Image: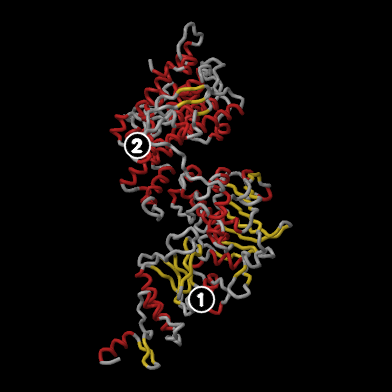
Amino acid sequence: MFEFEGTSLWKDSLASRDADPNQKARESLRVTLLDIRNRVAALVSLISAEIPGLTVHDVTHLDALWETASLIAGEDFHLTPAEAFVLGGAILLHDAAHCRAAYPGGLAEIKQTPEWRDAVAMALRRRSDEPPSAQTLDNPPQDILDESLPDALRALHAKQAEQLAVIRWPGPEAEDAGEHLIQDSDLRSYYGPLIGRIAASHWWDLVDLEHRLPLCCNAGTDLPAVWTVDPLKIACLLRVADAAHIDHRRAPRWLRTLARPTGVSRDHWRFQQRLGKPSRNADALVYTGSPFGSNETDAWWLCFDTVRMIDRELRGVDRLLEETGRPRFVVNRVQAADSPERLARLLPTSGWQPVDTSLRVSDVAGLVAKLGGKQLYGNDPKVALRELIQNAADAIRARRCCLPGVPDDYGLIQVALRTDETGIWLDVRDNGIGMGPRVLTGTLLDFGASLWRSSDMRWEHPGLMGKGLKPAGRFGIGFFSVFMLGDHVEVTSRRYDASHADTRTLEFRQGLASRPVLRDTPSDRASREGGTQVAVRLKVDPSVEGGLLFQTTTSKGSRLSLARLAAALCPTLDVSVEVADDLGRVHRVVEAGDWWSMPADGLLKRLWLDGNEKHVLTGSYMCTLEGSDGRRYGRAAISTAPSFLAPGVVTTDGLRTSRLGHIAGVLLGGEIETVVRDSSIPKVPLEVLSCWATEQASLICQADEPDWFCSDTSYVPIILALGGDPGALPVVLKGSKGITVSALSKMLHVTKRV
């Protein structure tokens, strides 16, 4: 007899009993479940080899969940035998896919999943910011493969758990029929999909349970009609039992000695090794343990965080059961989860005291307003428009990755100013990947958390990391710059793969000082192809000083057009940008990637924000900076204008970051150096730069440019500084005559005195 057969839930449902009119049906479920256990035991015994740092996930953990579930539910909680069978199956399968043997196709099958490519991409990006090539993703180095496999298995295990009850493993011989975890074909075909669904649900958000699980499951073949299954009840029981099973059985001392876990895994082992089996005090789960030494402070705090997580799960499940009219569990909280000091009385420390000194921000809105607004970016409202364009471009790049076969120039950003009875509004719209409610109300509002660089993206958009996406967004604060422009902000969004009716609007009516409101979007305002629109009511007229379009290049200042501003902010963007003027006319101000081929004068005009175009060159010397491998680094010409007037910029990810002196045009920059995005270093190699400077000298000579050595317009010092050969350009004056390098060399050979 197994230990779990003595638990209240088992005895109430599947245990044999005297004079049982349903003995045959009950025994069929019990025998089948025990057979599944034997098969799963072999499968989960392989997990420790696949993910060495993981705490115990073998069959002893699975057996213990019956005990934990019975403790939480209470002795009087009732399960039908069919519910117990489904619960037992879900318990056995929920973590069983943490090894490659859970996939009949082995590693080759795992490698075909989006989660595998995400795991490899994440491992590669921990070593380099460059997006990995398709070849590297398909055949990573051995160290990357070893690092990626545990990550991929963790990401896949819940999804695969849903399939384990019904899939077939091929036999060792070609003529073998193969094997199933559930050998009884009738029980497998009827209950298998539900068992898998509930097993997978332990990884879902709690709010998804009610909507993603069936309402009820009637009795299967040859079972009494009253043996129905309530999937939500069973999923809740699995969920809290799995979360709450933390004790010394998950981290045996001898096994820890052999496994030698490191990092966070070591702290998981440490704290669970200290804990005894949980008990119950009225409606509370109680954890006690042996003292944590001063070298185990991190483990204690991880334990505290885990206890709080269990407390949240218990409270959340209790609310869900109550709201849906289902029987509630006896346990609905964890004792002392609200206080480190109180928990230390149950989980004592030795030689130190757990005082909660974690970072706190009492005025979150104030901090965000400062660090996400003018205190960080300064008083330039143009920064906010740049950040909105950047976010829109990232969303479009992500959608390109999600839609195979779309052209490289897919996507459009639309910028407009409009006026209504409430004021002047700035709209920035894209047809990118869009946001669902979870991102719209979660990651978007998480100051400092970038979706593109968080683990949330793996759940929101599986496979996207592995498709070469290289977003410009890095810091997770750019959106908040919109509040520099105004307090009334509306973010309307729909995922590209959601229905038209799923469009939602998040509205900030008083900036960050009040809670935003999530509401349905009227059909006439909903995007027909998905994407996001950010609308902000401007608190300053865009044409006056301090406004979005005001340019302070003269003592009086001037007004930029919105079209000119938008183009100058993203001159090399790989996404097309349209701007609607005051009359509603639409102008395409940037065509995706057009800066490589557009007329030089047009590019220089796009770059020039200061309004004094007499300094803009004709661009006759402009040429591409290109390496021997064909990689391009910019398009520029040496400028005759003073350095502070040269229409040259550095761009990163298509967006203007900093200015260039003595160069007209664009050089591509590397990673931005600051959150403000106001500086980046050109990434052009020195050899490419020197070749380009030499080519510039040749072009200038061919143009027979006068005034070669005027102090304000000299090309030669710039060419020399860039490592170029001035060629036929004069480098010195002899009297009023310019002398080239070669002529100077000859002169020095025959002249004794200069």
Q: Dot 2: what SS?
A: loop
Q: Position of residue 28 (x, y in %)?
A: 45, 16
Percent position of residue 341, x then y: 46, 34
User: Which label belongs to residue 53?
Assistant: 2
The answer to which of 462 and 74 lies nearer the viewer is 74
The furthest residue to the right: 421
- In the image, residue 735 sits, relative to residue 30, either above or below, namely below
- Residue at horizontal 63 percent and vertical 70 percent from the top: 559
- The picture places residue 335, in percent across and down from the top left corner, at 49, 28
Q: Earlier in the sequence, mark 1 or mark 2?
A: 2
Extreme residue in the top direction: 19
- Per the model, the C-alpha gap separating discs 1 and 2 is 59 Å
- Asked if one can make out residue 177 in the rendered structure from this viewpoint, the answer is no
Quadrant including the C terminus: bottom left
**Image quarter for residue 752?**
bottom left
Location of the N terminus (image quadrant): top left
| Amino acid type, residue under disc 2 in the picture | Gly
Front residue of 176 and 754: 754
Question: What's under tag 1, amino acid-wise?
Answer: Leu
Task: Give whichever of 678, 421 is nearer the camera.
Answer: 678
Q: Secondary structure at mark 1?
A: loop
User: Which numbered tag is attached to residue 206?
Assistant: none
Residue at left offset 55%, top offset 67%: 568
Residue at the spot 42% in from the left edge and 65% down from the top edge: 681
Mark 2 is surrounded, within 10 Å at the Cα level, by few (under 14), some (14 to 19) or many (20 or more) other residues, namely many
Q: Which mark is residue 645?
A: 1
Residue 182: x and y in percent read 42, 24
